[in-house]
Amino acid sequence: MRKGVVVAAVLVMGMCAEEAAAQQPPLLPAKDVAALANELSGETAKRNLEGMATFHRQRGSKGFHSAAELVAERLRQYGLSNVEILEFPADGKIFYGTQRSRPAWDAETGRLYVLEPATEGTHRMGADGKAASDTSSIGKREKLLASYDGEPVALAEDSESADVTAELVDLGDGTNERDYAGKSVKGKIVLVSAQPGAVQDLAVGKFGAAGIVSYAQNQRTAWWGEDENLIRWGHLETFSPNKTFAFMVSLKTARSMREVLAKGERIALHAIVNAGQHPGKYEVVTATIPGGDPKLANEEIAFSCHLDHQRPGANDNASGCVTILEVARTLRKLIGDGQLARPARTIRFIFPPEIEGTLALLNGKPEFAKRIKTAIHMDMVGGGPATKAVFHVTRGPMSLPSFVHDVAWAFAEWVNEESYQFAATGRADFPMIAPEGGKEPLRAEYSAYTMGSDHDVYQDSSFRIPAIYLNDWPDRYIHTNFDTAANIDATKLKRAAFIGAASGYFLADMTADAKAGVQEAVSIGRFRRDVTMRERIQRAPDLGCLLMLQEMGYETGTSGALQNFLDGVSAGPSRSGLVTGECHPAMTPLEPKVVAAVFARKAEPKGPLAVFGYDYFADHAKAAGAAVPKLLGYQSLWGGGEEYAYEVLNFADGKRNVQEIRDAVSAEYGPVPREMVEEYLRALEQIGVVREVK
């Protein structure tokens, strides 16, 4: 958090640093805040996390089912209503909107051995990844290099059964044909630095490799590649016709292998895999706390996480799931005990596989999408100091203005102040400390929209459900075998649970009487958005006009969203957030106005085009003979191709023309040529996602 922003925010709220400890909590009565703070337990959440992290929770797998059963059992134990595990068939053929269902994947065995060398002067690889000389013959002894039983992350997702003994060939990256030049790959196992799915069609499909060993270093952060002992989660392409197996090894092991191979010496491996895809189902756990107002009980505030991940997957994303589970326990108990009034609206809790499960739910049961007014999505909310995590309250996209993010930030900022006051002085009314957790201040950040989890689905223009996104980033152990319960902070879980519970409970019971308090929260949010806008103008003065108009449109849209919420109106298409109007004479628009085409998104298919394990655009564009639009590979100041594509489609509402859409996404992510935006929309028209409005 920048110092200048903190000082200005304090001035806006009319307080000084010495008064921070006495600040009244926002939006909710102090007694309700005290009840939540006293009941929420970081330890209870962490105990649930320790159990969940024992399961390898791949979509449709036995491990996922066990985790789903654990969650459902806890929800029943906590007294939640309507506890169900909803099932949606997943066979690779059924579509849920833009998501092609991926068949379930299970693994029983995955073991990779290094064989003793056949001739004197060759090398074997020890289990520690170090090379060692030996003169034994192949087949006398095998040393275990990787085991699914011990480290499930060692076997790449979507691997297929095999029993292969073959030499290892180093391809470097492995994603370009030049990596294969002069190398005999057929029938061999290839060593690559890329993700297995990025090389399988070349290595296996074109050059006939028998399998893959990868040391891919995904999720680039400042700590990227620093710990050479990490084993990173790997994936094969679900729908590739070139079925194979892949093992993931540490950077340390890969370097040792490469050193041996660089000397012209041989490494022989034996891979035994019993795994594969099969027709199955997406399972989505759900439960409710019914609302108490007959007129509003059919409206829902949803808490969401994603239950799937590799084992242990503690922060990503057992942390989000156990935190909303703790919110469920706490709210149900306090309401049942009479410490909190039953809210007017229903509160729902949803535990799906990431993105694909949410798409299955909202498409397979459209009544859910109609009832949900707001989603509170938690994906990675428990990272302790060792993870280097920064906690974010992330706003929605500019295409969907909403006040709900300001509600969440009001509670988060209050927790920031209380937790800092406690850390700095040892005194605070609500330090939100878990006995087994740390005492560091939270220091949550109020962040612009970023993509990458189920909040993208809710806020897509198909559904237009505003989503509060609570998340950690960076996290140096994400997608590795070191993402363990030991690195999760119980205090962080408690604080995330409080921000979510307070926001959800407030929204579930919000009436017109609370409008003034919400407007105050929105005004504080507006101040922060204004700071961000002015920082961007300093970096990109040519965008000043667009940025100011975008902000004006967003704030107008936020006010409209608040009134719609109170009136029970869904967040349908509107021109909220539109970049339009006249610039100050000292500012020039990005380019002169032109007569431009207008596009409208069709009612089907529903969902973003960037889904999970399947590329809707690429698949349909190939079938339609459409070229790959330049926008998808474009990078600018604050975003890249995926972000531009998401928002261009969201802004295609049948009212904005291409230039207005270009202006809107330029203000959000940086300048982009109008021709790129139109080319992408024409490609979407070609595959039947949008239509031109004549």
Image: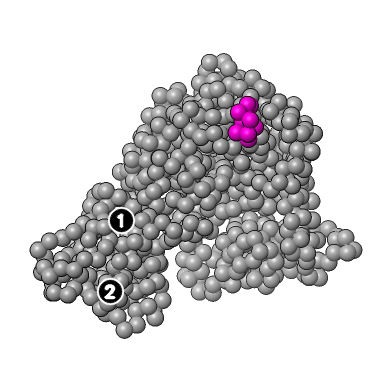
How would you classify the magenta stretch by its main secondary structure? Answer: helix
* Front residue of this view, candidates 58 and 119: 119
Element on which disc 1 rests: loop
Q: Amino acid at mark 2?
A: Leu
Q: Which of the 4 image quarters holds residue 180?
A: bottom left
Residue 425 drawn in magenta: yes
Residue located beneath label 2 in the image: 261
Element on which disc 2 rests: helix
Residue sitting at the far right: 585
- Marking on residue 633: none
Q: Is residue 77 visible?
A: yes
Residue sitting at the far front: 425
Q: Is residue 419 visible?
A: no
Q: Is residue 309 above or below residue 664?
A: above
What residue is drawn where x is 58% and y is 17%?
339
Q: Is residue 640 left or right of residue 253?
A: right
Residue 382 drawn in magenta: no
Q: Is residue 104 left or right of residue 266?
A: right
- Work out how far the residue at label 1 is from the one at label 2, CA to CA, in angstroms: 23 Å
What residue is drawn where x is 51% and y is 69%?
621
The x, y position of residue 441, in whole percent, is 59, 37
Q: Earlier in the sequence, mark 1 or mark 2?
A: 1
Q: Residues within 10 Å of mark 2 (few under 14, many from 20)?
A: some
Which stretch did the figure color magenta?
420-428
Residue sitting at the far bottom: 182
What residue is drawn where x is 75% and y is 42%?
7
Residue located beneath label 1 in the image: 155
Q: Is residue 433 above or below residue 609?
A: above
The x, y position of residue 521, in whole percent, is 73, 37
